[in-house]
Amino acid sequence: MSFLFGSRSSKTFKPKKNIPEGSHQYELLKHAEATLGSGNLRMAVMLPEGEDLNEWVAVNTVDFFNQINMLYGTITDFCTEESCPVMSAGPKYEYHWADGTNIKKPIKCSAPKYIDYLMTWVQDQLDDETLFPSKIGVPFPKNFMSVAKTILKRLFRVYAHIYHQHFDPVIQLQEEAHLNTSFKHFIFFVQEFNLVDRRELAPLQELIEKLTSKDR
């Protein structure tokens, strides 16, 4: 259960990705949750002393997947083929799906379909032991950071879609504090390690400036 959501029963969009208890990554996740509890997000995202950057990015990427999974799970009733025939983040940004293997040429599809493709693709990466090794001593592959960057770039698009197209239901469901805290944590994390290109963040640039200006 992600630190943000306490023990509330919450519908997730896809099955939650668990980090095995007792593993080093589980300890890292616990460390992340403890530091997040202190309220200082800038400090909380920093690489803990003596830890491996790949492992820290892996643990946090899994956690962001779980958070977005829950956040999107709360508004799936509002994100339909009819309400969102294209995957967009406001009028200027539209996303077409391609994963490079099953769908090589980008396709235009509805937001629920796009997010389903996206979350399924992320899940497949997280479940791949050669990409995200969960056992101690198994090295991360050389391309790990570029895969993690692609995952985070795509997860950002779900935040952007929720903020632009579904913020009213988020407010009605009293989820905006969860959404803002989760997104702020995500932004501080990707800024700390330069994981998502600034151009990709453009759809939420004003919000990012607002959320991060207080913590400079």
Image (tube, helix red, strand yellow):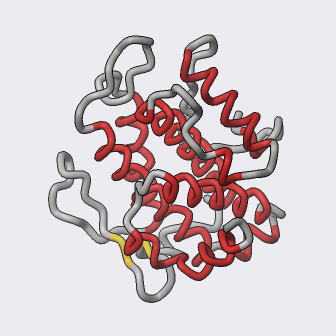
Q: Position of residue 37 (x, y in %)?
A: 80, 42
Tell me: 77 left or right of 99: right
For the residue pair 201 and 165, the one nearer the viewer reads as: 201
Q: Position of residue 179 (x, y in %)?
A: 70, 60
For the residue pair 191 and 1, the one nearer the viewer reads as: 191
Q: Residue furthest bottom?
A: 91
Q: Residue at x 79, y 71 (%)?
A: 171
Q: Residue at x 61, y 56 (%)?
A: 72
Q: Residue furthest front?
A: 49
Q: Position of residue 23 (x, y in %)?
A: 56, 14
Q: Where the C terminus falls, by quadrant? A: bottom right
Quadrant of the image occupied by residue 180? bottom right
For the residue pair 15 and 3, the one nearer the viewer reads as: 3
Question: In the rendered picture of this protein, how many numbered marks are placed on residues?
Answer: 0
Query: Does residue 77 lie above or below 67 as drawn?
Result: below
Tell me: 6 left or right of 21: right
Q: Position of residue 196 (x, y in %)?
A: 41, 60
Tell me: 3 left or right of 205: right
Q: Residue at x 57, y 30 (%)?
A: 49
Q: Where the N terminus falls, by quadrant? A: top right
Q: Residue at x 63, y 15 (%)?
A: 21
Quadrant of the image occupied by residue 165? bottom right
